[in-house]
Image (cartoon, rainbow, N blue to C red):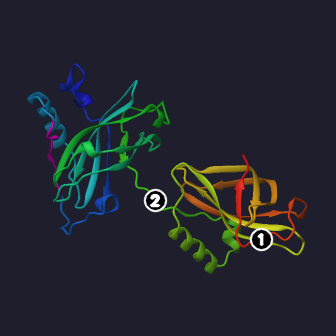
Amino acid sequence: MLSIFRRKNSDNVKKSGLDSSVSSGELLNETETSADEEIETELSIHPAWNIPSEQMYVLRFLNNELQPLKPNQISLSGIEMKADGSGLEVTAFVRNSLNKGIKFEQVGLLLMDSEKQVIARHEFSLSELGEIPGRSSRPWTFVFPPSSVQKTEFSKEDWTIAFELKKKHSLDLHSTWEKSIAEEDKEKLEKLLQNIQPPKAGEVNFMGLSAKLADSGDLHVTVLIRNGHEKNIQLQQLPLQVEDATGEKVAGGGFKLEDFEVKANTSKPWTFIFPSSLVTKENPDLSKWKVYPLQ
């Protein structure tokens, strides 16, 4: 049963959420050639559901109140949100303006308040939602577990449930690098990011780019700090160790960073200079090497 019908007086159900839409091409890689038209979506009930006539009337009424969609749009239209012990229950219409049916698998959803601040973020498996026919609208209840909730005080009006489109992992250059790096080198870094696997969700790792000993004996190590989090991270103290091709320690030391931020889902290159006093091995084999933070 949809959560909106668990209340005693379901006749008074009113739509408290807003609508959000994304391109079907961006979300599902599905597009159709069609005229610029307004598309009404017909109510579609999950085949396994047996909805009483009075509840069907409420759903039809709510669906008829929805704004038409444009071609090649997938939309979420919020109906009701309520909190209980299992987290936040959000009932919404999942709408499809394509002429053919669509199915979802793993989908990231955002729940936002009236100021577009994130209330909750969660990854849903929507195989149970089934196929949503072309030009139709299917009601569904999404449960955001307590662990996904980032905000507990918010207005229960004008909230939005939306698809979270994953942006590609990108390059984040510090302002000093932005001013000094050659365009050719920047393009090489961007191409590198396109060709390597991005960090896993919630992971921060370090990828070595270059390591060389200066005439002074200092070791210059350039690394790519890769942030797989959905939020920016701040680095202040960073203890690092470098090992050469033999697996032996070459250098180790702590670095203090000021105003050093790696934006969400980006990689930032940075050069760390180990003074000769911290270089512990003479003539290291840097044909292959690794750098990692010490715990």
Q: Residue at x 11, y 33 (%)?
A: 57
Q: Give the residue furthest to the top.
A: 8
Q: Secondary structure at mark 1?
A: loop
Q: Is residue 253 left or right of residue 132?
A: right
Q: Is residue 105 above or below residue 46?
A: below
Q: Secondary structure at mark 2?
A: loop
Residue 65 place in picture, x, y as percent: 19, 42
Residue 4 place in picture, x, y as percent: 25, 29
Q: Amino acid at mark 2?
A: Lys
Q: Nearer the viewer, residue 4 or 281?
A: 281
Mark 1: give few (<14), some (14-19) or many (20+) Cα within 10 Å: some
Q: Residue at x 40, y 24 (%)?
A: 85
Badge 1 is on which residue? 285
Badge 2 is on which residue? 167
Residue 45 lies within the magenta run = yes
Where are the magenta residues, as a range?
A: 39-48
Q: Amino acid at mark 1?
A: Asp
Considering the whole magenta stretch, tell me its main secondary structure. Answer: loop
Residue 275 place in picture, x, y as percent: 87, 63
Q: Quadrant of residue 62?
A: top left
How far apart are labels 1 and 2 at the CA level?
Answer: 38 Å
Q: Residue at x 33, y 58 (%)?
A: 27
